[in-house]
Image (cartoon, grey):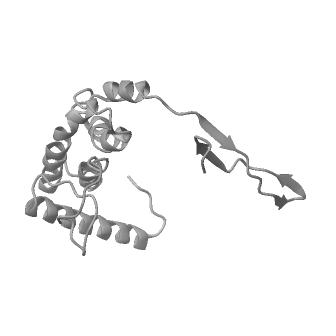
Amino acid sequence: MIQFVLETDRALFEDAMRFAQQQVRKLVETHPGFYPMYTADGKWKHEGQVWTNWCDGFFPGIMWIFHRWNLAVSRANGASGAPEKDKFWLEQAIRYTTPLAPRQHDRDVHDLGFIFMSSYYRWYRLTQEGGSDSGGQNRVAAIQGKRPIPALVCRREFALHRHHDERRHHLLRGTRNGRS
């Protein structure tokens, strides 16, 4: 559970969580099975170009966060079992996570971590099931490990700072293939 110093911060956070849940629920109910990527004219569902699918894990990921949050709030308030709204988020998180499993074999996408860490990993961390290998984390890691990685060329850029009369330099930027 998140610790707050000021109760006003807690209230602000709780309001934001409620609002986010309303918005995501509305999207799930209006466009079932849709994985949003970006908005156009304030709308998630549009005919805009989808140039990649690396964001698909984020939507179920937020549902796993809602599930965990509602469960924690329920327990903090002394309730046993999952509240109805928590059951909704658990069902939706599983519903939106499960279709991502075949992506574990995708060798053309370098962003598999975004897909699986946001979705199956959260599932596994919360339940110690589901995400264990049905999401194929081991296979995803193996696929990522087989990809050729071009040489990483680093260039030193110095930033001089005066701190108690000491001069320090920092390696500021790594570049791939010698390009900035």
- In the rendered image, residue 153, in percent from the top left (x then y), is placed at 63, 39
Q: Residue at x 17, y 42 (%)?
A: 94
Side of 52 where 10 appears, left or right? right
- In the rendered image, residue 61, in percent from the top left (x then y), is placed at 28, 49
- In the rendered image, residue 18, in percent from the top left (x then y), is placed at 25, 66
- In the rendered image, residue 100, in percent from the top left (x then y), is placed at 21, 39
Give the answer, above or below, for where 177 lies relative to 60. above
> How many numbered circles does the render carry?
0
Residue 128 visible at all: no
Q: Residue at x 62, y 45 (%)?
A: 174
Residue 111 visible at all: yes
For the view shown, which residue lies furthest in the right direction?
165
Side of 34 where 106 appears, left or right? right
Side of 133 where 30 appears, left or right? left
Q: Which quarter of the picture shows residue 85?
A: bottom left
Q: Residue at x 13, y 46 (%)?
A: 91
Q: Which quarter of the picture shows residue 46?
A: bottom left
- Considering depth in this image, is 129 or 146 the residue closer to the camera? 146
Give the answer, above or below, for where 124 lies relative to 30. above
- Considering depth in this image, is 20 or 40 the residue closer to the camera? 40
Side of 31 where 126 appears, left or right? right
Give the answer, above or below, for where 109 lies relative to 9. above
Q: Which quarter of the picture shows residue 143?
A: top left
For the view shown, which residue lies furthest in the front direction?
178
Q: Residue at x 58, y 33 (%)?
A: 151
